[in-house]
Image (cartoon, helix red, strand yellow):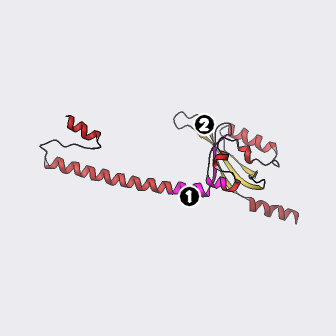
Amino acid sequence: PKSMLAGFNKGAVDYISKPFSKEELLARIETHLKLSELQNSLKDKIDEVAQYIELMDKNIITSATDLDGVITSVSSAFCDICGFSKEELISKKHDIVKHEDMPKEIYDNLWETISQNLTWKGELKNKRKNGTSYWVEITIYPDFDKTSGEKIGYTSIRHDITDKKRIEELSIHD
């Protein structure tokens, strides 16, 4: 009937026709209580995941690129270490943080590896926005479209190893 359709259009989620049986009413109430409980549980889990993602964003140095190395996303931790804002990084190539001291062969090997859908691991010296340098241990993974299986880009996770590299330099020079 029109009243039932109007009710659904205004946000109703169920409809009971008159006359109704006590058993049907109790079954529907029980179903809606279960749905409400599941909805609340799902909301709690979504909030928990959002908090986890926020913690990861603040503390894990990550970035994602398209197939050409153009940055599509970066974590806040990435911005903190390099000194660039997300707006300054998104849509730029990763060489925005590339340090001129790094041999070209390292990047050739990196691209050759990830182009073959393999994971690349290594240490890179990068350059901050202010010109100072920092070192990272980096792992780059290929990303694939979940539906087609086609490679769509790369994700990298970095660990700041600047202090370790400084100690290595000191031990060599001393």
Q: Furthest-left residue in view? A: 19
Between marks 2 and 1, how big is the CA–CA gap?
26 Å
Tell me if residue 49 comes above or below residue 8 in the rendering. Answer: below
x and y percentages locating residue 110 in the rendered image: 73, 43
Front: mark 2 or 1: 1
Q: Secondary structure at mark 1?
A: helix
- Asked whether 63 falls inside the magenta stretch, the response is yes
Q: Tag on residue 152?
A: 2
Label 1 sits on residue = 55
Query: Quick check: 91 left or right of 146?
Result: right
Across and down, in percent, residue 32 comes to 27, 50
Q: Quadrant of the C terminus?
A: bottom right
In the depicted structure, whether residue 138 falls above or below residue 8:
below
Asked if the stretch drawn in magenta spans residue 13, the answer is no
Q: Amino acid at mark 1?
A: Leu
Identify the residue at image location x=74%, y=44%.
Answer: 95
Q: Picture quarter containing residue 155?
A: top right
